[in-house]
């Protein structure tokens, strides 16, 4: 039997229970909710569990934000961006944290240019169409998206975020981008990434995405379940990019391992990529671009089919043995390496091309093949590859010492002969007058007496002036030139002559 007090208590309990379990929808979808403080937010959403429309956090918000009781927002939940006396946009600079403990469904999440933000926590969020978190480089930011499983469009995260972890995310139908800074995503180089703190990237159950961009200072990557990266898969993505997988990093050496990745069109790995491994990847529909900044090797195995492979940077070695189909191969390392393995692979893959198409000895460009290294000629390569014989030290000394002594003796003997020849050359020749006297006395060949030639001939007599010419031995020929007999046939002196300045007066000697 019901009593009056008992009936009243039951009614109160039922009302309380219904109120706590019944969704209360607020908003009409035409007007967005704009709030600048926690008091305004709590007042406008008092008693609501779902909001039809969008919620904007005003730029004057100061302190933490807590979105209580709301489980669903049909449009966006975003921070305000405005321009105030500057061409640069300004966000909610004094917002320090965002917590939405009950939120499960959301269309767009956009939090940007909140320089003092340290935490974003949406632990029960399961579905969202787009996530944009960027331009938050001042403070280290922590994220909590523990339950997020599917993203209908794209996820762009950029800032000072030591760890980006989405432990339940399985599918992103657009671009998945994690960067140290938003500007690095579109940058043409990777070097600026070293100016930012490192980021650990953790997506343990992610299987599919249209694009994957990891740019900046990437410390580690954990994506053991990723199978597909393809633009054809995504029905909505942020920006049409050139690569399906782009990892451009600077900082500590990064190991890239995607053990289940098997469907992809284009890959670009640049910067401090120490190694990479794609053990399930057999086909690349587009290009594979590899440009390491530190010493690294390019081992494409087990890849079989690709359209274009472009290797450059600080390359130490490469392996192309598994390839069975390739249209373009370009190797342009920072330092010269042997082109022989690439040339051998190209001959195997494209035997129809003539190797004489282009070759200047250091670079090859055979209808799609280019290698900026050098070729080791086959004979020279065989010689270089031949191991050097291991000669015992004792045998080397036993042969080398006698050979050295022999050459030293030969050099000494040669110098001795030269010194003897020089001594003989220094002996003066015999005196001419002594030789003539010896010959006149019968000691040698008799030669005619020598009489110097005199100038100033008067009639048939020679002059008294001796000319220092024709001072040679008599000719061996029987006939002499005219006047020879007169010049040497008489030893008498002649009288004065009426000649010129070359005469000597009679009675004087030269």
Image (cartoon, rainbow, N blue to C red):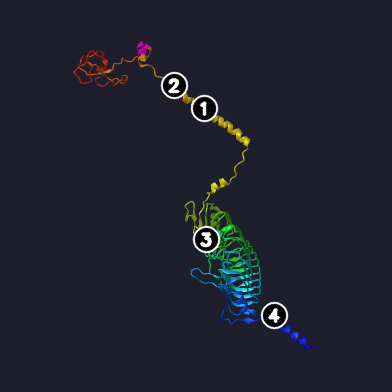
Near-viewer residue (202 or 398): 202
- Would you name the residue on which mark 1 appears? 412
Q: Nearer the viewer, mark 2 or mark 4?
A: 4
For mark 2, give the secondary structure: helix
Left-right relation of 224 to 433:
right
- Would you name the residue on which mark 4 appears? 20
- Nearer-N-terminus badge (3/4): 4
Q: Gap between marks 2 and 1, in whole Å?
A: 19 Å
Identity of the residue furthest to the left in this view:
498
- Nearer-N-terminus badge (3/2): 3
Q: Nearer the viewer, mark 3 or mark 4?
A: 4
Q: Gap between marks 3 and 2, in whole Å?
A: 82 Å
Q: Which mark is residue 424?
A: 2
Q: Are marks 2 and 1 in contact (CB under 8 Å)?
A: no
In the image, is residue 342 part of the stretch drawn in magenta? Answer: no
Q: Is residue 501 above or below residue 7?
A: above
Provide the residue span drawn in magenta. Answer: 436-442
Q: Is residue 435 above or below residue 236?
A: above
For mark 3, give the secondary structure: loop
The quadrant holding residue 175 is bottom right
Near-viewer residue (229 or 305): 229
Q: Nearer the viewer, mark 1 or mark 3?
A: 3
Count residues near mark 4 (Cα–Cα under 10 Å), then give few for <14, some for 14-19, many for 20+. Answer: few
Q: Gap between marks 3 and 4, in whole Å?
A: 55 Å
x, y percentage for residue 309?
A: 54, 60
Q: Which mark is residue 189?
A: 3
């Amino acid at each position: 039997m019901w009593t009056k007090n008992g009936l009243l208590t039951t009614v109160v309990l039922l009302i309380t229970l219904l109120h706590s379990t019944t969704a209360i929808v607020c908003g009409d979808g035409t007007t967005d909710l704009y709030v600048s403080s926690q008091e305004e937010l709590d007042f406008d959403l008092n008693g609501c569990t779902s909001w039809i429309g969008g919620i904007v956090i005003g730029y004057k918000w100061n302190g933490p934000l807590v979105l209580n009781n709301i489980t669903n927002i049909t449009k966006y939940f975003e921070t305000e961006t405005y321009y105030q006396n500057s061409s640069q946009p300004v966000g909610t600079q004094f917002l320090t944290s965002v917590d939405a403990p009950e939120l499960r469904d959301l269309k767009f999440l956009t939090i940007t240019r909140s320089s003092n933000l340290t935490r974003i926590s949406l632990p029960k969020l399961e579905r969202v169409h787009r996530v944009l978190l960027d331009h938050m480089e001042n403070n280290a930011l922590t994220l909590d998206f523990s339950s997020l499983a599917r993203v209908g469009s794209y996820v762009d995260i950029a800032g000072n975020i030591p760890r980006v972890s989405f432990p339940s995310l399985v599918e992103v139908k657009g671009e998945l981008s994690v960067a140290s800074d938003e500007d690095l995503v579109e940058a043409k180089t990777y070097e600026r990434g070293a100016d930012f703190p490192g980021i650990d990237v953790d997506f343990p159950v992610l299987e599919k995405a249209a694009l994957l961009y990891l740019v900046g200072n990437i410390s580690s990557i954990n994506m053991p379940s990723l199978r597909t990266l393809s633009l054809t898969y995504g029905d909505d993505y942020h920006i049409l990019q050139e690569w399906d997988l782009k990892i451009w990093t600077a900082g500590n050496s990064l190991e890239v391992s995607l053990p289940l990745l098997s469907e992809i069109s284009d890959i670009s790995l640049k910067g401090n990529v120490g190694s990479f491994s794609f053990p399930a990847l057999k086909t690349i529909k587009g290009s594979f671009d590899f440009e390491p900044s530190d010493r690294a090797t390019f081992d494409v195995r087990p890849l079989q089919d690709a359209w274009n492979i472009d290797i450059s940077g600080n390359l130490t070695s490469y392996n192309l043995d598994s390839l069975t189909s390739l249209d373009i191969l370009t190797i342009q390392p920072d330092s010269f390496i042997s082109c022989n393995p690439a040339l051998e692979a190209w001959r195997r893959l494209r035997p129809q091309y003539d190797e004489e198409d282009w070759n200047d000895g250091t670079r090859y460009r055979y209808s799609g093949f280019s290698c900026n290294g050098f070729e080791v000629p086959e004979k020279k390569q065989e010689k270089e590859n031949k191991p050097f014989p291991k000669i015992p030290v004792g045998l080397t000394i036993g042969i080398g010492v006698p050979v050295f002594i022999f050459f030293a003796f030969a050099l000494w003997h040669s110098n001795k002969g030269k010194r003897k020849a020089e001594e003989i050359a220094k002996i003066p020749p015999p005196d001419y007058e002594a030789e003539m006297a010896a010959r006149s006395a019968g000691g040698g060949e008799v030669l005619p007496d020598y009489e110097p030639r005199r100038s100033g001939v008067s009639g048939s007599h020679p002059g008294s002036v001796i000319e220092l010419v024709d001072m040679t031995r008599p000719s061996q020929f029987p006939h002499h030139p005219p006047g020879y007999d007169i010049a040497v046939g008489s030893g008498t002196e002649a009288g004065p002559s009426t000649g010129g300045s070359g005469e000597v007066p009679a009675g004087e000697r030269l």
